[in-house]
Amino acid sequence: MLHESDSERDERFMLMALDEAAQAFAEDEIPIGAVITLGGKVIARGHNRTEALRDVSAHAEMQAITAAADWLGGKYLPDCTLYVTVEPCIMCAGALGWSQIGRIVYGASDEKKGYHTYIADRSPLHPKTQITPGVLADECAALMRDFFRKKRR
């Protein structure tokens, strides 16, 4: 990827997060996937596992944060980027804030449970965290719609 633009890199890693989300879908979990990178390399992956683990905190972001911290041997992720298919919820945003993650790239917005819904004047994220919303948003949203449409049948 010698001459890859920032947007091409973001789409490449979001496609990996979408693969994680598809795995969650196949496991009958809400299809959200996450990938954490450092220096352009994937160091952690995760997808929702709340049903399998019977744990409401087993969101894709939480799985990926734990794996990245383990890989790094420390809890802070200031040089890392999280790619996640749906805007983080307030719980995940809080954990991402504590991790001091450097950048968050997400696909689809979450009007009901996304962290933006809950913030008034102060974000739970670290003040230096950069946010890039809307990467492959249509694809990410379509996977969620398909999952819930299947559930309603």
Image (cartoon, rainbow, N blue to C red):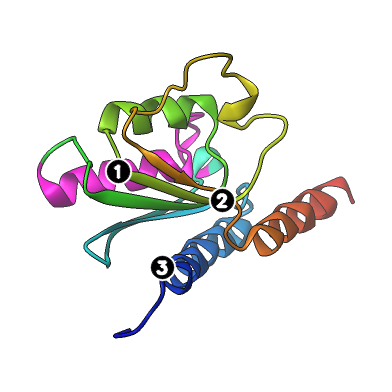
Which residues fall within the magenta stretch?
A: 52-73
Residue 54 magenta: yes
Q: Is residue 130 depicted above or below 47 in this figure?
A: above
Residue 122 rendering spot, x and y as whole percentages: 47, 16
Q: Name the side, left or right, on which 64 lies relative to 86.
A: left
Please name the residue shown 65% across and 57% down the image.
137
Which labelled disc corresponds to residue 6? 3
Q: Earlier in the sequence, mark 2 or mark 3?
A: 3
Please name the residue shown 52% across and 25% down the image.
90
Please name the residue shown 47% across and 22% down the image.
123
45, 134: nearer the viewer: 134
* Disc 2: CA contacts within 10 A as few (<14), some (14-19) or many (>=20): many
Amino acid type of the residue that numbered disc 1 sits on in the rendered structure: Gly
**Residue highlighted by disc 1:** 102
Name of the residue lying farthest toward the left: 73
Compute the Cα span from label 2 to label 3. Answer: 23 Å
- For the N terminus, which image quadrant? bottom left
Compute the Cα span from label 1 to label 2. Answer: 20 Å
Q: Say which of marks 2 and 3 sits in front.
A: 3
Residue 18 rendering spot, x and y as whole percentages: 55, 64
* Disc 1: CA contacts within 10 A as few (<14), some (14-19) or many (>=20): many
Q: Earlier in the sequence, mark 1 or mark 3?
A: 3
Element type where label 1 sits in the image: loop
Residue 121 magenta: no
Q: Is residue 11 depicted above or below 110 in this figure?
A: below
Q: Say which of marks 1 and 3 sits in front.
A: 3
**Residue highlighted by disc 2:** 32
Q: Main secondary structure of the magenta part?
A: helix
Please name the residue shown 28% across and 41% down the image.
66
Element type where label 3 sits in the image: helix
Compute the Cα span from label 1 to label 3. Answer: 15 Å
Element type where label 2 sits in the image: loop
